[in-house]
Image: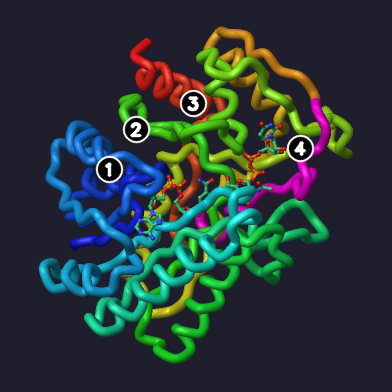
Amino acid sequence: MKILVTGGCGFIGSHTVCELLDNDYEVVIIDNLSNSKIEVIDKIKRITNKEVYFYEGNVQDKDLLQRIFKENTIDGVIHFAGLKAVGESVKVPLMYYCNNIDSTLTLLEVMSECNCKNIVFSSSATVYGVQDTPKYVETMDRGKSSSPYGETKAIIEKILEDLYTSDPTFKITILRYFNPVGAHKSGLIGENPNGIPNNLMPYILKVAVHELPELTIFGNDYDTPDGTCIRDYIHVVDLAKGHIKALEHAHNHEPNIYTYNLGSGHGVSVGEMVTAFEKANNLKLNYKYGARREGDLPEYYADPSKALRELGWKTEESLEDMCKDSYHFITMEKGE
Ligand code: NAD
Ligand code: UD1
């Protein structure tokens, strides 16, 4: 089977491409390198010892997509390509709506034209918004989006639902990720954003390698055991494996629209993450407590039981693995 992976040079995409190649899928990547580097392609080849086909370009470019589908017999698509910085999406919402939604519409149009009707879409736990309980389950309605980024995910989920209603020959799998962290065991690929990171693990890593002086923990007065926010962190390799399970499931089932949480099911506080990182890597992190970050929810985590029941998927990597693998990657990146 040949899979088109949009955004395959990015953090989650590159790990998923490795899993696909390890499982004998053929892979074609389209990525415009707006948030990734071309070197990732060589690293994927080094890790897997397999060939991967790469097209540099924008998923909004219909001519390019048509060419890709003409030059390759694509059996399915995993659609990662998108902009993902929550804060930036508040500042430049039009760029986010345009990039994320237009690329999805263009992709779906070309897929329909080429009769390729099998797509796995990267959604986010952010679509749940605020719920009455912290344990998010797929039967809950989507909540109010807290940012234009989150809104693009909710809109795309709705577009996919409407598409399925109009054309029930589509196999659509929506995967709602919780908080992906960690890196490939090789240390060759991982997440290392340019500039000052917004997310917790990339920030911790920059503090650990002394690129930033200290971590600010956003709030220690939440109604949680240690006062800091609780999230469901998931190792990116576990997440990548979830995509293989989703493809296998789609292959073995009738067309439908399937939605799954991909998370560990366990909440970890920011304080616990800091302690786990220090212990796993035998170091001390400089940190201080600061004000709450606007828009942060005190606590949420996945109910991952549907993914276990229907996909046969659950997380295997521990919090210690997430901390060790992330640190291994950043020290390799820095050549330490
Ligand atoms: P990433 O930024 O590392 O990867 C996205 C890739 O898509 C990048 O390589 C970028 O260059 C590419 N891209 C963006 N727009 C494109 C376009 N129009 N055409 C071609 N390529 C384009 O992000 P990631 O963390 O790997 O996330 C992958 C997907 O998962 C995204 O859709 C993201 O919104 C979603 N997601 C991520 C997280 C997370 O915390 N990382 C959580 C939930 C959902
Ligand atoms: C954020 C996004 C969410 C997106 C997710 C992807 C917001 C409000 N939400 O989730 O839409 O789907 O990333 O992973 O941005 N923290 C600190 N100090 C820091 C950075 C983070 O204390 O320097 C805390 C945060 O307050 C939060 C936790 O660490 O409690 C995790 O933060 P982060 O990694 O940004 O993810 P989320 O906020 O859960």
Instruction: Pick the residue in front: 4 or 62.
Output: 62
Kind of element beneath mark 2: loop
Tell me how many marks there are.
4
Q: Which residue is mark 1?
A: 18
- C-beta proximity under 8 Å, tags 1 and 2: yes
- Residue picked out by circle 2: 189
Query: Which mark is first along the chain, 3 or 2?
Result: 2
In the rendered image, residue 219, in percent from the top left (x then y), is placed at 81, 33
Quarter of the picture holding the C terminus:
top left
| Tags 2 and 3 touching, CB below 8 Å | no
Say which amino acid is labelled 4.
Cys
Q: Residues within 10 Å of mark 2 (few under 14, many from 20)?
A: many
Depth check, mark 1 against mark 2: the one in front is: 2
- The residue range painted magenta reads 290-309
Label 2 sits on what residue type? Answer: Ile
- Label 1, residues with CA under 10 Å away: few <14, some 14-19, many ≥20: many
Corner quadrant of residue 217: top right
Q: Which residue is mark 3?
A: 321
